[in-house]
Image: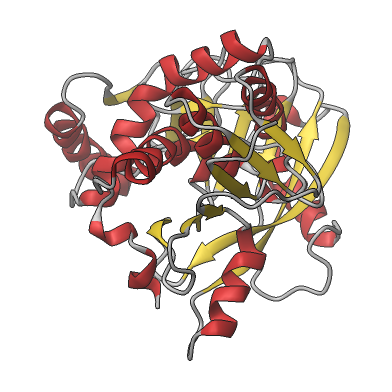
Amino acid sequence: MAMPDVTVRGAGVFGLATAWALLKRGLCVQVIDPNGVASGASGGIVGALAPHVPEQWNPKKAFQLESLLMADDWWADVAACGGCDPGYARTGRVQPLAEAGVALAKDRAKGADTLWQGRARWQVTDQPGDFAPPSASGLWVHDTLSARIHPRQACDALAAAVCAKGGEISTGDIRHGGPTVWATGHEGLADLTARHTRLVGAGIKGQAVLLAHDARDAPQVFIDGLHIIPHGDGTTAIGSTTERDFDDGTATDTQCDALLDKARALMPVLRDAPELIRWAGVRPRARTRAPMLGRHPFRQGDFIANGGFKIGFGMAPLAAEQLAHLITTGENLIPEDFAPDRSL
């Protein structure tokens, strides 16, 4: 490989997506991660690409909407180039409604009609389909914007597309040339905090479980804080915990037991589904809770792609394209709320 135009540090979804977007613009790109592809939070099993509620609109919600709407074509291009399935599908989502929540849900449906530009629906229904939890009101929210993705498969698909496009992915052998994009997850947030005078961001641990239950054509479910995601390979993911204090970011424990017990109680169809694997990882959350995209505040000429936390995979298509646009043209289209120095 020739001297790179851009080096990307980190082979999670933000790093790989940015490399892919840069390669499509004709740049020579190397991706460096000492632990390999999707070794951190991006190697998870849940993959809920779910929108914020359609109300109290702001730049973050508008950005997420655009990214979710472009995801169909974006992930299809990744799959076509690299020949690997990212596990993406726009299958929607259902949420049971309590009686007290019905009026608000109907108001949000009206908001979605305008804010989602008629390209997706948020509706209250009494026909949620077979893969749905009981509802006290007999009603559910069904939105058609939510999608699923298999995080590990998606990163493998991106890695294959990057290599097919002429990029290089390695665990070392850095050849310096051009700027660096720092997409280094919670370790990168810790580095930023060490360079600053207060907390810039932190790692939040999550645990999840994968079950052998085939509901691949059904919408995902969100209930009582749980995401229940039927994947295209005949598995169903349950996630996740949110843990600020932990000793081992990759170990599962009794909180995972509680997670699974709760899912089986809320979704009777899963009561006898065999457990396949458990997963734990540390997700990067910036102090502002918004992704950090743009120029690096401490490394002149470099850039940051970090802070995806729970919405990284949903944000990744547009985040990568806009960061690549900034790097190649100097024009910054990224919302000001995402500027890395906003978290300082």
Q: As displayed, is residue 246 above or below residue 138?
A: below
Q: Is residue 211 left or right of residue 166?
A: right
Identify the residue shown where x is 78% and y is 34%: 210
Q: Please identify the quarter of the rendering in which residue 341 is found.
A: bottom left
Identify the residue shown where x is 43% and y is 61%: 301
For this orientation, the residue located farthest to the front is 2
Q: Is residue 296 visible?
A: yes
Q: Is residue 108 left or right of residue 262?
A: left
Q: As displayed, is residue 216 above or below residue 285?
A: above
Picture coordinates of residue 89, whole percent (x, y): 52, 17
Q: As displayed, is residue 166 above or below residue 202?
A: above
**In which quadrant of the rendered image does the N terminus lie?**
top right
Of residues 168 and 274, the one nearer the viewer is 168
Q: Is residue 140 visible?
A: no
**In which quadrant of the rendered image does the C terminus lie?**
bottom left
Of residues 198 and 304, the one nearer the viewer is 304
Q: As displayed, is residue 166 above or below residue 35?
A: above
Identify the residue shown where x is 20% and y is 46%: 55
Of residues 178 and 34, the one nearer the viewer is 178
Picture coordinates of residue 96, whole percent (x, y): 44, 35
Q: Please identify the quarter of the rendering in which residue 73 is found.
A: top left
Picture coordinates of residue 144, whole percent (x, y): 36, 21
For this orientation, the residue located farthest to the bottom is 197
